[in-house]
Each structure stands twice: as C-alpha cells, then as structure tokens.
Image: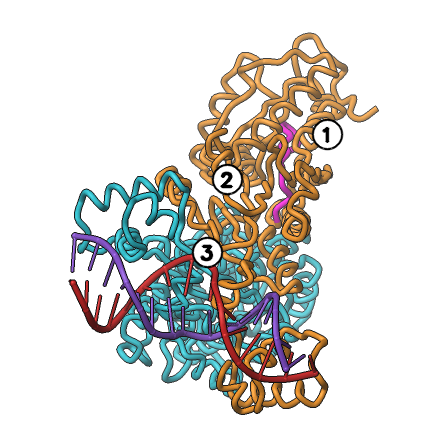
Chain colours: A orange, B cyan, C red, D purple
Amino acid sequence: MADVAERAGVSTSTVSRTLRGLSTVSPEVRARVEKAARELNFAVSRQAASLVTGRTGTIAVLVPTLDSWFMGSALSSLATLLRAAGLQLSVYEIPDLAERTAFFQHLPARRNADALLVFSFDLTDEETARLDDLGMPVIYVSRHVDGRPSVYADDVAGALHGTRHLLNLGHRRIAFVQTTGARGFSFSSEERLVGYQQALIEAGVPLDDDLVVATRAGSKRAAAEVLGTLLSLREPPTAVFAEQDEVAVALVWNLRRTRIAVPEHISVLGFDDQPPADWFDLSTVAQSPSEMGRQAGELALKLIDDPEGEQGRHVVLPTQLIPRATTAPVARGQGEGERDRPGAGDA
Amino acid sequence: MADVAERAGVSTSTVSRTLRGLSTVSPEVRARVEKAARELNFAVSRQAASLVTGRTGTIAVLVPTLDSWFMGSALSSLATLLRAAGLQLSVYEIPDLAERTAFFQHLPARRNADALLVFSFDLTDEETARLDDLGMPVIYVSRHVDGRPSVYADDVAGALHGTRHLLNLGHRRIAFVQTTGARGFSFSSEERLVGYQQALIEAGVPLDDDLVVATRAGSKRAAAEVLGTLLSLREPPTAVFAEQDEVAVALVWNLRRTRIAVPEHISVLGFDDQPPADWFDLSTVAQSPSEMGRQAGELALKLIDDPEGEQGRHVVLPTQLIPRATTAPVARGQGEGERDRPGAGDA
DNA sequence: TTGAAAGCGCTAACAT
DNA sequence: ATGTTAGCGCTTTCAA
C-alpha cells in the first residue's frame, strides 16, 4: 500500500480511504490512486485490515461433509449471497467424532471469522455452550436449537403430509425407514419420525414398532436387508416411507429386482427431492437446502451488524409433497385385517 | 495472547512458541501456558500471525459451483487433506461470466491464500497469465494447462475405452452426446469427444457428424429432443455414449417411456460413475474426483514448500469402464447398412 | 480533504 | 530456555 501511496503521491491513509470507497476523497486524488493501484496490481490484505478492524470478512461454516446433495445446494446458494456481500466463505469439514472433538477443543474458527454457520450437527449442550462464547454470531442450520438463531425445514410437517398421502391412498400398514450413518442429520431424522407417527395417530392407525426400521444410506444391500425384515412380517407393509431419497431409490431397486411391482404392490415414498428422485419418478417430500443456505446467510449478515438483534430468531422452511410414480392406491385385496374395500384410493 | 502470557507468568514469545509446538519450551512452562490458554479460551489469530509470517494458512479454491457430484467429492477429499495439514479451505464460487470477470479484475485471493486450486475452468491465456503473477502457486484441476501444474482425469482414454466397449459389442452406429451448460467443464468435454473419435477411427468406422449432438444436463426434455434428432436419422444409432451420467440417465428414461428397450434396442453408456449410475444400473466410465482433489491438495502442499519444485508437473488419473445393465451386444439384424428388422428387440 | 502517528496481535531476530 | 524488541500492512484517531 505504501508503494501505491508513493506512486500516487499521497499518504497511505488516502490510499486506504480511496480503496474502501470512502467519500472523503477528492475525485482527482481518487483517480490517481486507483490508477496506481491498478498498475501495481495491488489488492488489500484482508489479514492486515482485519487486524485493526476486528472484522475478518469471512463467514465460516461447520459441515459434516461437502459431498452430498444437501450440502452442495446449501453452500452454493450461501456462496452466492456472501459474494454479493463481499464476504469470503471458509469451510470446516468435520466428518467424524475425532475431528469433531478436535474442533471443539480448539475452536479454530475463533477470531478467524465474523460468524459461524453450524450445519445439521446434533450437538451436546456443552458443545453448544462452547459455541455461545465464541465471540461471534452462531447460526444453526437444518436443525432447531432453543434460544439460538436457527434455520431449518419443517420436517415434522413434511413427514406428516407424506404419511397422510399414503393414508389417503388407503394404506394402513405403512413402514418408516430411518437412515443411520447420515453424519450429522439425526435431528431431522427424529423430527420426521414424529411427523409419521402424528399422521398415523390422527388417522387412528395403531403405531407398530415392527414397521419402523433403520438402514444405511446408499447401500443396495442394506436396503435389501430392511426389505427382508419388512416383507417377512406377519402383516407386511403396503407402503414404505423412507426418510431419504437415496434409501427410497435403493428400496425400489430391490423390490423391482424381486418382481414386486412398485407402486402396484408396494408404494414407496422418499424425502428430499434430490435430482435423482425425478429421474426415478420417485414420489417424495421436497425440501429446499438452497433456500436454507440463503436464509442462514441472510441471518448471519444481520447478526454481524447487530449481534443482539435476532437472537433466538427461527426460520422454518416449508416442505412440499411431490407425488410421482412410486405411490398409488393400495391394491385390491391388500392391506391389513378385515379392512377397507381395497382400491378405495383417495376420497 | 498477552493475557495468556500474564496468567502463565511468561512472555508472549513463550506463549507463541508453546502454541506453535516449538521444542524450545520446557515441559513445565509448556503445561502452564497450555492451561492458561485453555482457561482463557484462547485461539491464535491467524490474521495476525499471517501478517508477520507471510503465510495465511489457507488454500483457496476457484470452482464453478459447489452443487455437483464432482465438486462435492473433490472438495471433500481436499478438505480432509488440508485439515490434516492444519490448513483452512476458502471457497471462491464463480458461477457465471460476470462473476468471473469480477474475480479476475480484482484477484481477491491475492495475499489471502497460500495457494490457489483452479477447478475445471476453460481460461483464456490472459486469465492464466494473470494467475501466473498472483504470487502464489496455482494448480489446475480437472484440466490440463501447458507448463502449469495440473491434475486431471484421462478423459481421452476414458472415452476411447468406452467407445471400444460399444464397438466390441458389435455397435457401428454410435452416437456421442455432449453436454452444454455444464459450467466450466468444456475442457473434459472436448477431450472425451477426441477419445470417442479415436476409437471409431482405429476400428475403421467412419465418423458421422450427425451422430454427435449436444444437450443440456439434467433435463428430461432436452434429452427427449436429442433422442428425437438421433431417432429420426436415416440410420439411427444402436448405441449412445453420453459424456455425463446425468444425461445418460435422462436418455434411458426417455427411451423406456417410449418403449424402446434399453439395452435390447439401444445401448446407453455414461461417464463419471456418480452414485445414481449404480442405482440405475447404468454402464459408465468411472472417474474419481475425490482422488483428483486429494492429488491436487498434495501438489499444492508441495508447491507451497518449494514453489519452484514441481512447476509443470502433471498428474493424470486413470478412468475405468464399468459395464452394467444398459449396454449389450447389438441386436441381431440391427446395425448399419441394409439393417434392421424393426422391433427386433432381444436376440 | 489530507497527513502523521499509533497500534491491532502476532512472530522472529537477537540478546540473555 | 526465555525475554526484549521491532516490525508485518493496514485502519483510525487526531491534527492540520
């Protein structure tokens, strides 16, 4: 910056003022400085600037992985927002418990970012408390945390609507397939189970623990095992609600290989509406991670400007049932007990 | 840091040395300092440190998007590597031309990172030159740049092998579907076309421009249009090689909807081996973005330590044909020339 | 509107 | 093995 000042024949103060766009610089001087800066290929060092301003110009995100549809969409829209605000995006990826422990021990984000966005993690109270005195706004994304700013999808309502759809199609034996090992997403998982149960209760359908099973995401083999469990029940389900599209797709794949027609014999419903859901014609409950990323970013910007302003503010995003080709009215003669004139379908 | 020094009863230099793990600190003092730092919840400001060391402790990546299988996998493995090396990951997302222009005008990464990884972009010579005097190592990923360190997949060989597979199955009319609008990936696209052509030439099959078509990624409708073009040729293809799995899947979807059996009537081959390829039983040519991210990261670390060391070093990663259920021998009576008893279907 | 000077939090060279 | 001191490159008083 000293070089630029010399070349423009002004002081470094003036260069600084010019480059930050302050109005207190005369047009002619401004022109000279900008020219000099351009010629010298000068770019301000954020590091040095932040040392005195106390602002780093960086937003940090804590994510379980970068390699998922959810995180990709969310971070992409977040990045767009930050770019417009002139902020950098810094990523902390915490794929496992060891890394997580290390992160919370040292809290490396401290003083190296202006705000922290925590995605999806199921934190302990102690961890949340650690983040509380990190000295910067912390926003929780894709999960609700009491008393802290959070942005998340309405998982309960999503699962409720999805299950209602299946009930409306005449299904009474509806299985719910949870996903294990989806790092950091256990919160949504619990919420979705609640929505599923609520729908059954409001319809007067008894809950049956045998119909709630768990599997690993993205494994055809694990999906086969889950199906084995469900299909060997005394009263097997006529519909399966998977809390993730990937699992739903793996279920469909296995069913079709076994020549169990989907949706004629079994309906399958997913959750997320990832792109492959469309390719597979999978009925699903859509959520919008990109909207989540955007909202979380906006909240972060507000909190940076006014740290006390929106504490405890919650943004709940809607979900949307997308019926496609893997859900259908329960087949005639199918279903439970003496039941329902099958094929009743939607009223 | 002064607080920590006071609490531990030492100088800031000693605190600094301790926290950086230098060996010239006595065990007892080290213990005192670490205790004080923990109690005060102290974390070193990278900003201040970098001001004097000249190192930012950050690797910057320039990416066209974060929302894709390729970038997710690549950045995820890169992040793992960087974490182990104690480095931060800073993301510059440049989704369109306007953002790109802005980036190259200001080069905001200058002095704010220790190395830059440029993913996939087809840069002009001028842009490459700008990056050359950025004052930090620049590594090009997923594309080859003469004289600069690059890490990329062997797209030519991948497409060559894929096309050979189709030729070996007896196909002679083989279409190649390019993807447009896949931001920043035009380099690979060209390479794959070259591989396709090489295979045809070595097999003595004449090139036919009518068989090379382009479509948008991820659009069923666009895929339908491409199929319309190909299926209305005088001699339609018996196999289609799409340079991206998403396009291949969209083609299969459209074909099956039209009751054109895949692979019995038309074979379809993809490129990438994204997870949905497995769900769809799509034959494809696999590449490994996670390996690409890892290798690029390692190269970056080397170049930071020894900027002159590996200039111009190229890492070329292999591809692998994965035959699944969408490619099959050409049907009896099908193929070129006098051809096909229509509706031949399975042999 | 501009400049001089102090200092942000740290590291590195030097001294002890 | 530890302390002292001088900056790193910038922003921000304060004074002119």
Query: What residue lies at 73% left-to-right and 28% top-to-bottom?
Result: A165
Q: Chain of mark 3?
A: B
Residue A268 included in the magenta stretch of the image = yes
* Magenta region: A263-274
Q: Chain of mark 2?
A: A
**Element class at badge 1:** helix
Query: What residue lies at 62% left-to-right and 33% top-to-bottom?
Result: A144
Q: For the residues marked 3 and 2, what is the alpha-carbon distance in whole angstroms?
A: 39 Å
Residue B182 included in the magenta stretch of the image = no
- Tell me the crowding category of disc 2: few under 14, some 14 to 19, or many 20 or more residues within 10 angstroms, Cα based: many
- The answer to whether A312 is drawn above or below residue B134 in the figure is above
- Image coords of residue A276 (percent x, y): 59, 48
Q: Chain of mark 1?
A: A
Q: Is residue B236 shown to the viewer in this render?
A: no
Residue at image mark 3: B273
Residue at image mark 1: A161
Foreground: disc 3 or disc 2: 2
- The answer to whether A347 is drawn above or below residue A338 in the figure is below
Q: For the residues marked 2 and 1, what is the alpha-carbon distance in whole angstroms?
A: 35 Å
- The answer to whether B174 is drawn above or below residue A313 in the figure is below
- Residue B247, quarter of the rendered image: bottom right
Residue type at the position of mark 3: Asp
Label placed on residue A131: 2
